[in-house]
Amino acid sequence: MSERAVPQSFIASILPFMVMCVGMFIALLDIHPDRHADIKRQRRFLTSPSVPTTTYRDSHGNICRRFTVPAGGFRILFDGVVEDSGEAD
């Protein structure tokens, strides 16, 4: 009897911004902690230019990243592979 393969989803984004002045960002781009067992590969959260980030959890358990963005061009980059059946959570 063969095992059924669990589909994998590749997630990736490069989010470019043109920021007119220094400002605070809050990003909710991390996979929810309830799904961490399904993560097969995930790179760390990257920004260009590099800025320090802090994380916290909101009232729904989402991982939120807070950081200060400099004026000018700014990018957020992330990617990963997650096992997902495609069915609703």
Image (cartoon, grey):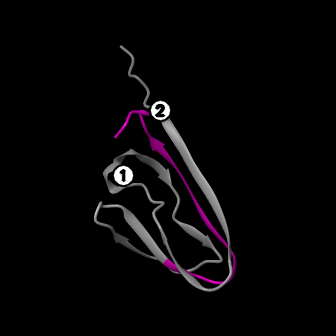
Q: Who's the residue at 29% across and 60% down the image? A: 60
How busy is the neighbourhood of tag 1: few (under 14 within 10 Å), some, or many (20 plus)?
few
Report how far apart the C-alphas of labels 1 and 2 lie in the structure.
16 Å
Q: Is residue 82 above or below residue 65?
A: above
- Comparing 49 with 89, the one in front is 89
Name the element at disc 1: helix
Q: Is residue 6 above or below residue 14?
A: above
- Main secondary-structure element of the magenta-colored stretch: strand
Magenta residue span: 67-89
Image quadrant of residue 74? bottom right
- Is 15 one of the magenta-colored residues? no
Residue reaching furthest left? Answer: 59
Residue reaching furthest bottom? Answer: 22
According to the image, label 2 marks what residue? Answer: 7
- Is 71 one of the magenta-colored residues? yes
Question: In the visual, does 6 lie left or right of 43?
Answer: left
According to the image, label 1 marks what residue? Answer: 36
**Where does residue 12 sit, x and y in percent of width and height?**
59, 52
Name the element at disc 2: loop
How busy is the neighbourhood of tag 2: few (under 14 within 10 Å), some, or many (20 plus)?
few
Q: Who's the residue at 42% across and 55% down the image? A: 31
**Where does residue 37 sit, x and y in percent of width and height?**
34, 48
Which amino acid type is marked by label 2? Pro
Image quarter hosting the N terminus: top left
Q: Who's the residue at 38% across and 22% down the image? A: 3
